[in-house]
Image (cartoon, rainbow, N blue to C red):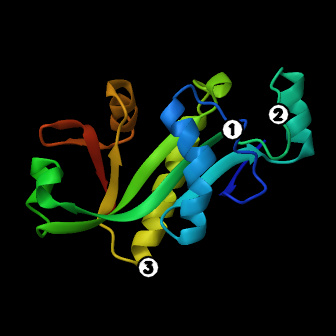
Amino acid sequence: MIKLEPLTGHHERKAFDCGVEPLNIWLKQTAWQHQTKGISRTFVATPADQQAVDDFQTLGYGLDATSILGFYALASAVVVMDDLPMELAKRYPRQVPVTRLGRLAIRADMQGQGLGQLLLADAINRAKSAAEAVGSAGLFVDAKDEASSFFYQRFGFTVCHHQPLKLYLPIW
């Protein structure tokens, strides 16, 4: 019913609304630019096919085949050892290559249905695959608020030392 794919120019970014304006603006104005310049990679959840579009419309969702249901972005980054959880930091050198989960958002009318979990699982899998080809010790995320921090913690992310909105998930 849903497919996950890289953001392209044919996806309808302007209609996306997750209820958090900075995330909406980033998707509408920045995501595609970063994608084309190789700065980050954005992945979107869209209806899998016309049958899925029809099913969503039957349920009252106003969308079409190019609608974005949710998205996340990944980028390479380096964090300093002090930014990591204390119990993990001692395993690493001063600077640690990581994959950064820069954004994750779900359409406001589809939140609370498990799509965020699906996107996070896909992000973790892509980060692991990338780490096999290019060094990355783990997945690093800056949560936007305490509720987001708890969301990531439910999936194994550890809060970084004295920074409750910075979280880390080791890959190895």
Picture quarter with the N terminus: top right
Question: Which is nearer the N-term, disc 1 or disc 2?
Answer: 2
Q: How far apart are marks 1 and 3 (CA)?
A: 30 Å
- The reply to whether the C-beta atoms of the residues labelled 3 and 2 are less than 8 Å apart is no
- Residue under circle 3? 133
- Residue under circle 1? 69
Q: Residue at x 59, y 34 (%)?
A: 106
Q: Residue type at mark 1?
A: Leu
Q: Residue 63 carries which label?
A: 2
Q: How far apart are marks 1 and 2 (CA)?
A: 9 Å
For disc 3, the neighbor class at 10 Å (few under 14, some 14 to 19, many from 20) is few
Q: In this view, does 62 lie above or below 156?
A: above
- The reply to whether the C-beta atoms of the residues labelled 1 and 2 are less than 8 Å apart is yes
Q: Residue type at mark 3?
A: Ala
Callout 2: SS: loop
Q: Which of 154 and 148 is in front in this view?
A: 148
- In the rendered image, residue 68, in percent from the top left (x then y), is placed at 71, 42
Callout 3: SS: helix
For disc 1, the neighbor class at 10 Å (few under 14, some 14 to 19, many from 20) is many
Q: Taking the image as drawn, is residue 117 in sight?
A: no
Q: Which of 154 and 23 is in front in this view?
A: 23
6 lies left or right of 122: right
Q: Residue at x 52, y 38 (%)?
A: 23
23 lies left or right of 102: right
Picture quarter with the C terminus: bottom left
How many callouts does the rendering have? Answer: 3
Quarter-of-image position of residue 139? bottom left
